[in-house]
Amino acid sequence: MKFDNRNNTIKIWRRKYIFTILLLSLVIIFGFVDYFQKPVLGLDKSVFIIGLGIFYIILIIINALLKHDFVFYADVGDKIIMRYYPIRIFYRKKHSIEIPKSRFVRYEIEKYFFGMKERMFLFQKTQSGIARYPGVNLSAVDKEDIERIKKSLQQYIKK
């Protein structure tokens, strides 16, 4: 099975760009349109601009807490391959996990972001024991695809 969440990644980037353009347009409108030169609803235009800025910062923080990752998963051949990297502007470090199917031990799921999102940890048998790989955030992966990955990994767990 091969899988990646490229479509979801594109949707997330597109949503961020559209929202940024929309908020910048509103700031320009509040700043330069004559209608907002006088108080509207008893509020000065600076209150509207500051409110938009605070709203935008809150959205940035929520996106940072969600920790969206691009995820590629493949179990073709004799290895389980999981490649991932965060979907952030200034973070371009890519990670790759390659585990021979014969050495794969198990996987664990950890919930985060108030229990709504999942992070997956893979375990491999090594000469010195069992190695735990860093977690892969699955917040940008559809629930059905997460289940497909879990089913795929489940078949390689030795009982």
Image (spheres, rainbow, N blue to C red):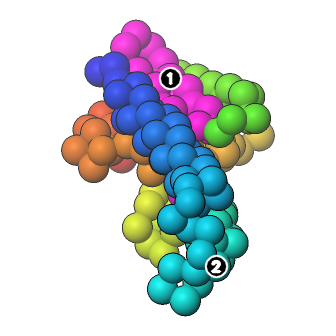
Q: Amino acid at mark 2?
A: Asp
Q: Secondary structure at mark 1?
A: strand
Whether 78 is among the magenta residues is yes
- Image-quadrant location for residue 146: top left
Residue 12 relative to residue 86: left or right: left
Q: Secondary structure at mark 2?
A: loop
Q: Residues within 10 Å of mark 2 (few under 14, many from 20)?
A: some
Q: Is residue 139 visible?
A: yes
- Image-quadrant location for residue 34: bottom right
Q: Is residue 138 visible?
A: no
Disc 2 vs disc 1: Cβ atoms closer than 8 Å? no
- Which residue is label 2 attached to? 44
The residue located at (67%, 28%) in the rendering is: 95
Q: Position of residue 111 (x, y in %)?
A: 48, 66
Q: Position of residue 26 (x, y in %)?
A: 53, 54
CA gap between label 2 and label 1 equals 55 Å
Q: Residues within 10 Å of mark 1 (few under 14, many from 20)?
A: some
Q: Nearer the viewer, residue 4 or 41?
A: 41
The residue located at (54%, 47%) in the rendering is: 25
Q: Which residues are magenta?
A: 64-87
The extreme top residue here reads 77
Q: Amino acid at mark 1?
A: Ile
Whether 26 is among the magenta residues is no
Vertical side of 69 occupied by 62: above or below? below
The residue located at (49%, 47%) in the rendering is: 22
- Which residue is label 1 attached to? 81
Q: Nearer the viewer, residue 17 or 155?
A: 17
